[in-house]
Amino acid sequence: MSHIKTMNLNDGSTFPAIAFGTVNVKGAQGVYDVLNAIEAGYRLIDTSTNYNNEGMVGEAVKRTTIPREELTISSKLPGAAHAYDEAILMIQESLYRIGIDYFDKYLIHWPLPKQDQYVQAWQALIDAQKFGLIKTIGVSNFLPEHLDRIIDETGVTPATNQIERHPYFNNKALIEANKKRGIVTEAWSPLGRKINDVLENETIHAIAKKYKRSSAQIIGRWNMQNDVLHVVKASTPKHQKENLNIFDFELSEEDMKQIDDLDKGEPGRVEGQDPNGYEEFD
Ligand SMILES: NC(=O)c1ccc[n+]([C@@H]2O[C@H](COP(=O)([O-])OP(=O)(O)OC[C@H]3O[C@@H](n4cnc5c(N)ncnc54)[C@H](OP(=O)(O)O)[C@@H]3O)[C@@H](O)[C@H]2O)c1
């Protein structure tokens, strides 16, 4: 494995530029998958209360020989706990589930603007950071208006915003909006979660052939060259290793543009989850 690039965040912290995603990574098999991922070289683990697998992540953290301080554990606040007091209790509960005493990173999972409690949720993350429960605080699926509101009302800017991004929905404008505010973008479902056929796309295949890489590696590299943190899930050990091997080649500007041009706009979303309308408990 080549050396993993790191990214500097606006709160002074440094994170690996690749996270191991854990949607559908569960139970005893999940522990094995996470341990394999750590063995392969992943150090940033992305989970969420909504994934129902924080206990599994905790079991892997307990069993690995890699010291806790070398791991970066990130989870997310569910919509049911946006009210301030609920959020503080949820963060504590989530820590107990994983069996750790602080989060390296913790995000609000969705803004849920119809529920309109994300400002108090953000205040809870700010305070939990002061209490020492979280090191880096951020958000997920926030649009510019949601970002501006939490920044204006609390004076604190999130360090990261984890958003949907893959070649069919590249979310470029939101990445720019994040950058303008000093926020690092994290990309979720970068391979289209196998719901879309982005890994079979002809343009990406042709670029992959040219660089003697896989389609998944080309997409990972595209994120690296855009300074986007790549949150990728793989249970297959071969996929896990392959996805980390993206630091010893460089895509040309022309190839980067060809990938950008695959964007389909809103219809390109994997499951139509527009953050302004999406409800976690529909
Ligand atoms: N914040 C949010 O709202 C949000 C939403 C969605 C996801 N996420 C996060 O983002 C992570 C990644 O997204 P995702 O899980 O939806 O999907 P993804 O990472 O886009 O795709 C995962 C799929 O791609 C396959 N795969 C991985 N590497 C491959 C390779 N090198 N070659 C071929 N196939 C490969 C995996 O297969 P195998 O597993 O069989 O190897 C799996 O079926 C999640 O796990 C989660 O942590 C966050």
Image (spheres, grey):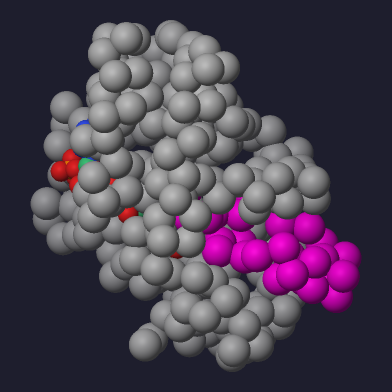
Q: Where is residue 19? Give x, y as percent.
A: 43, 40
Figure disc tally: 0
- Image height of 215 relative to 119, above or below: above
Of residues 59 and 176, the one nearer the viewer is: 176
Q: Residue at x 32, y 48 (%)?
A: 192
Query: Is there any visible trace of residue 244 in the rendered image?
Result: no
Q: Position of residue 227 (x, y in %)?
A: 60, 31
Is residue 111 in the magenta section?
A: no
Residue nearer the viewer, 139 or 249: 249
The answer to which image quadrant residue 239 occupies is: top left
The quarter of the rendered structure image containing the C terminus is bottom left
Going by the image, does 43 lie left or right of 84? left
Residue 256 sits above or below residue 271 on the image? above
The residue located at (49%, 55%) in the rendering is: 265
Q: In the image, which residues are magenta? A: 139-165
- The answer to which of 12 and 113 lies nearer the viewer is 113
Q: Position of residue 93 (x, y in %)?
A: 45, 75
Q: Quadrant of residue 122?
A: bottom right
| Residue at image location 70% in from the left, 45% down from the top | 176
Quarter of the figure with the N terminus: top left
Q: Is residue 40 above or below residue 264?
A: above
Q: Examine the image and state in which quarter residue 50 appears.
A: bottom left
Q: Is residue 171 above or below residue 18?
A: below
Residue 145 part of the magenta-drawn span: yes
Q: Is residue 148 visible?
A: yes
Q: In the image, what residue occupies the spot 78% across and 58% down?
A: 157
Q: Nearer the viewer, residue 37 or 135?
A: 37
Residue 237 image offset from top left, x and y in percent: 17, 31
